[in-house]
Amino acid sequence: MAPGEKAKTSKGFSTSPHVLFAELMDFFLGRPLAGRLAGAEAPVCSCAACEGLWALDAFAGNEGERQARAAAHNVAVLMEWLRTLAAVACSGSALSPRRMPIGTVPGAVQASSSVVPPLGD
Ligand SMILES: [Zn+2]
């Protein structure tokens, strides 16, 4: 860069943080997302990080704490999904039918044991 020349801005960094839009299960840059939500009532996020105080159009720039807030939002949503999937996985195994040997009739176990002749005869 020559002396007096204006510094070129990097095109490699976005001007807004990535925000996880839970309903669409995808990441969006905050600025285009805010543009899409413009004119409509932006959904207020109820994740553990946003606590219903931040709407999804609040991440339109990198100023202030927006990047940290967006990262906290993303992690909170991902952790909610993880807890939900873990709960589904656990309850799914509890709901599966109990394994039972083929041909076994419930309640027939005691009846068949009385048919067995005593040992020693
Ligand atoms: Zn959130």
Image: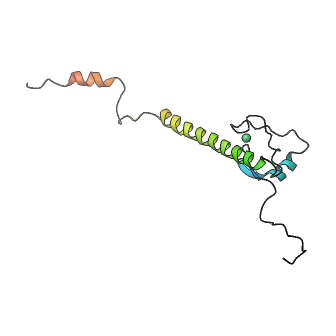
Residue 8: image quadrant is: bottom right
Residue that protrudes farthest toward the front in the picture: 3
Q: Which corner quadrant holds the N terminus?
A: bottom right
Q: Does residue 68 appear in the picture of this structure?
A: yes
Q: Quadrant of the C terminus?
A: top left
Q: Position of residue 21 (x, y in %)?
A: 74, 46
The image shows residue 105, relative to residue 76, as above or below, that is above
Quadrant location, ligand no. 1? top right
Residue 79: image location, x then y, percent = 62, 42
- Seen at 77% across and 65% down, the residue is 12
Instruction: Please indicate whether residue 105 sits to the left or right of residue 41 in the image.
Output: left
Front-lying residue, 46 or 37: 46
In screen coordinates, is 52 left or right of 121? right
Taking the image as drawn, is residue 20 in sight? no
Residue 114 x/y as whole percent: 22, 21
Which residue lies at the image location 52% right of the left edge and 34% below the top edge?
91
Q: Nearer the viewer, residue 49 or 96?
A: 49
Q: How many marks?
A: 0
Percent position of residue 37, x then y: 86, 45
Q: Residue at x 84, y 40 (%)?
A: 42
The answer to which of 7 and 60 lies nearer the viewer is 7
Q: Residue furthest left?
A: 121
Name the image quarter holding residue 83. top right
Indicate whether 10 appears above or below 105.
below
